[in-house]
Structures are given as structure tokens and as C-alpha cells.
Image (cartoon, rainbow, N blue to C red):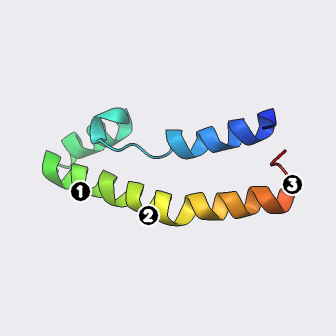
Amino acid sequence: MPLTTVLMTQVIGYATPLLPYQASPIVVAMGMGKVPPREGLKLCLLLALLTFGLLVPLDYLWFGLLGWFG
């Protein structure tokens, strides 16, 4: 797999924290907004499900159209 493909797939992983403590801006915003940890967890899990359900297949299709696989 080309280096460009590997680097672009890392963006998906970095942009998708499964738990709030994995992204410090989320923790700071939750503290400032007095958001309960359970609600932050729900948000992170929902975003992860949407990312892996919608964005990963779209990225795969896009990479295929660009010819970045092999």
C-alpha cells in the first residue's frame, strides 16, 4: 500500500476518539459546559459509529477512485 494511502487512513483514526478522555478539547469543553461524563461518552460513541459506518466506506471509495490502492 502506498505511503499516501496509509497517511490518509490515519486521519480517520485520529479524528475518531472512542472515549472523551482521548481528546483533551472534548474533556475541557465538557468541564466548562458541565456536561456529565455519560453524555460525553454517548456523543463519542455515536460519532465513532457514524464515522465507521459512513465515512470509512466513503474514504475507501474515494481512495479507489484516486487509484491509491496498489
| Crowding near the residue tagged with mark 1, few <14, some 14–19, many ≥20 C-alpha atoms within 10 Å | some
At a point 81% along the width and 36% down the height, the residue shown is: 2
How far is mark 3 from mark 2, CA to CA? 25 Å
The residue nearer to you, when weighing 26 against 38, is 38
Q: Which residue is mark 1?
A: 42
Indicate the position of residue 55 as horizontal and vertical percent values.
Answer: 56, 61
* Side of 19 where 48 appears, left or right: right
Check the picture and name the quadrant holding the N terminus. Answer: top right
At a point 33% along the width and 60% down the height, the residue shown is: 46
Tell me the mark number nearer the camera, choosing from 1 and 3.
3
Q: Which residue is mark 2?
A: 50
The residue nearer to you, when weighing 64 against 24, is 64
* Residue 47 drawn above or below residue 21: below
Q: Which residue is mark 3?
A: 67
Indicate the position of residue 62 as horizontal and vertical percent values.
Answer: 74, 61
Indicate the position of residue 3 as horizontal and vertical percent values.
Answer: 79, 33
Amino acid found under the numbered disc labelled 1: Lys
* Side of 41 where 66 appears, left or right: right
* Side of 5 where 24 appears, left or right: left
| Crowding near the residue tagged with mark 2, few <14, some 14–19, many ≥20 C-alpha atoms within 10 Å | few
Q: Dot 2 lies on which element?
A: helix
* Side of 24 where 34 appears, left or right: left
Q: Earlier in the sequence, mark 1 or mark 3?
A: 1
Q: Earlier in the sequence, mark 2 or mark 1?
A: 1
Q: Dot 1 lies on which element?
A: helix
Check the picture and name the quadrant holding the C terminus. Answer: top right
Query: Where is residue 25, by image quadrant?
Result: top left
Amino acid found under the numbered disc labelled 2: Leu
| Crowding near the residue tagged with mark 3, few <14, some 14–19, many ≥20 C-alpha atoms within 10 Å | few
